[in-house]
Image (spheres, rainbow, N blue to C red):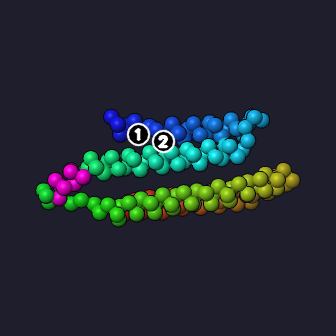
Amino acid sequence: MLEYILMAVPVIFLVGSVLYAYKSVTSRRHTRKRAVLSQLAAFAAVSVVCLVTAAITAFAEGDAAGAAEAAGAAVKDGNAFGLAMIGAALATGISGIGGGIAVGNAAPAAIGATSEDPKAFGKALIFVALGEGVALYGLLVSILIISKV
């Protein structure tokens, strides 16, 4: 039961921080600096909760892993599995950030070019799609990493 509660806490922190950031940006009372600080605080809280959940799970499964090894069952190497998951997360996250930057710069230029010459829509759309392709390639790499583990 405790694990389910600990899994719900990060979702609550992230949703709350996104709502607070949206409210901060749209209203005049709050500053954008406070919105960024709330996002960082939510990230720190989610990180702590995830570490606590992992520690609780590791202690709970420690006895089960010892029993599985005694029975001769194969147990995955924890370090290799963890590094593979970190690599998959980095591949997805960094490529998503890069794709977002590319689309954020290409889309306004594409809209401006289309407003001046409607025939330029197809050419402009290619540059926006190339930026999104970067994020998709990162997702594919992370899927390949996870499938090899």
Residue marked by disc 1: 6
For the point 44% across and 60% down, which residue is it? 86
Residue 77 at x, y percent in the picture: 29, 63
Point out the stretch of residues depicted in magenta: 62-69
Q: Are marks 1 and 2 in contact (CB under 8 Å)?
A: no
Residue 37 in sight in this render: yes
Residue of label 2: 10
- Secondary structure category for the residue under label 1: helix
Q: Residue at x 51, y 36 (%)?
A: 12
Residue in the picture at 33% in, 34% down: 1
Secondary structure of residue under mark 2: helix
Left or right? Give the position of 45 relative to 2. Answer: right
Q: Quadrant of residue 144?
A: bottom left
Q: Amino acid at mark 1?
A: Leu
Q: Is residue 119 visible?
A: no
Q: Which of the pair 114/51 is nearer the observer?
A: 51
User: Horizontal and vertical percent for residue 55?
Assistant: 35, 50
Coordinates of residue 139 in the picture (x, y in percent): 51, 58
User: How far, Cα to Cα, is label 1 from label 2?
Assistant: 7 Å
Q: Residues within 10 Å of mark 1 (few under 14, many from 20)?
A: some
Q: Residue at the left extreme?
A: 71
- Left or right? Give the position of 43 relative to 20: left
Q: Main secondary structure of the magenta part?
A: helix
Vertically, is 113 above or below 34?
below
Is 99 displayed left or right of 57 in the figure? right
Where does the C terminus fall, quadrant-wise?
bottom left
Q: Amino acid at mark 2?
A: Pro
